[in-house]
Amino acid sequence: MAPISYHLILSGILFTIGVMGVLLRRNTIIIFMAIELMLNAVNLSFVALARHLGSMDGQLIVLFVMAVAAAEAAVGLAIILMVFRNKETINADELKLMRW
Amino acid sequence: MDLLTFFMLAVPLVLFAAVVILHPSPVYSAMSLVVVMSFLALYFFFLDAHMLGWFQIIVYAGSIMVLFLFVIMLLNLQNDPQEHQQPSLRTASRIGGAVLIAELVFLFSRSSSSEKAAAELPEGFGTVVALSEKLFTDFLIPFEITSILLLIAAVGAVVLAKR
């Protein structure tokens, strides 16, 4: 049996990779994928803890996280499409309309 | 899940997650994200979350990643403008990642080593019946709110894309 801390460490590593992706990359779509990666890392720890505690609550929260992630992906990608249509770029360094 | 299974799933997960953020081409990133999602679905099966494993494949590896690939191809970003960014941000992100990992290792080394064994699993843990029974009793209001959220997101995406 792999102890619960192994699952949590793996979840932490995946989350860190997601954070580094958001910080390192300037392509908005890849930043978006890194955010999905972070959401999945959190899902992983929820499922592992649900298994450890023998309670279904963690799995249900993962279900809601998935629904929110789907909504986020639909709206976010629509925004990226709009930005590309107006600015001809999706590089995060060149999008400074809302930055002071 | 025994240790061998854990490492057989964990090593590819970390490797493909690294490919997602390091590969210059967005299409390769998206394809390795599909692999990450599929391995996570396998992981869920081994953690007795059968229904969530299928949801992971259908929702993430299926619909969300198709959406990503669709947008990547619509934008046609072949000549990825080499991502010039300030070197200060680059080093800052490296330091930030290193600090996060170090913090993780530190916290786990300090946590008490005497771990309680996993609890006894109730009958039918992670099955459709158990999941839906809880979903439609204890979590009914969040469930309804989520359906409204999805409706709003769908309408919002259509409005944004049509403008």
Image (spheres, coloured by chain):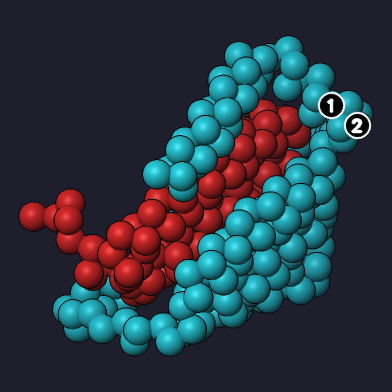
At which x and y percent is residue B74?
Answer: 53, 67
Would you say B21 lies left or right of B134 here? Answer: left
Q: In which quarter of the image is residue B69?
A: bottom right
Q: Chain A is drawn in which colour?
A: red
At which x and y percent is residue B150?
Answer: 58, 31
Rate crowding at label 2 as few (under 14), some (14 to 19) or many (20 or more) other CA atoms within 10 Å. Answer: few
Would you say B147 lies left or right of B81 here? Answer: right
Residue at left 17%, top 51%?
A98
Q: Residue furthest front?
A: B163
Residue contact at pointers 2 and 1, CB within 8 angstroms = yes
Q: Say which of marks 2 and 1 sits in front.
A: 1
Q: Considering the image in quadrants, where does the C terminus of chain B appear?
A: top left
Name the kind of residue labelled 2 in the image. Gly
Task: Of the two numbered discs 2 and 1 on the same chain, state the one appearing first in sequence.
Answer: 2
* Residue placed under numbered mark 1 in the picture: B130
* Relative height, residue A72 to residue B150 (above, below): below
At which x and y percent is residue B128?
Answer: 86, 32
Number of numbered discs = 2
Q: In which quarter of the image is residue B33?
A: bottom right
Q: Mark 2 lies on which chain?
A: B
Name the kind of residue labelled 1 in the image. Ala
Q: Camera-side residue: A71 or A61?
A: A71
Would you say A80 lies left or right of B64 here? Answer: left
Asked whether the viewer can see residue A72, the reply is: no
Q: Camera-side residue: A72 or B79?
A: B79
The letter of the cyan chain is B
Q: Mark 1 lies on which chain?
A: B
* Residue placed under numbered mark 2 in the picture: B124
Residue at left 45%, top 65%?
A29
Residue at left 21%, top 74%?
B89
Q: How far apart are marks 2 and 1 (CA)?
A: 6 Å
Q: Residue furthest right?
A: B123
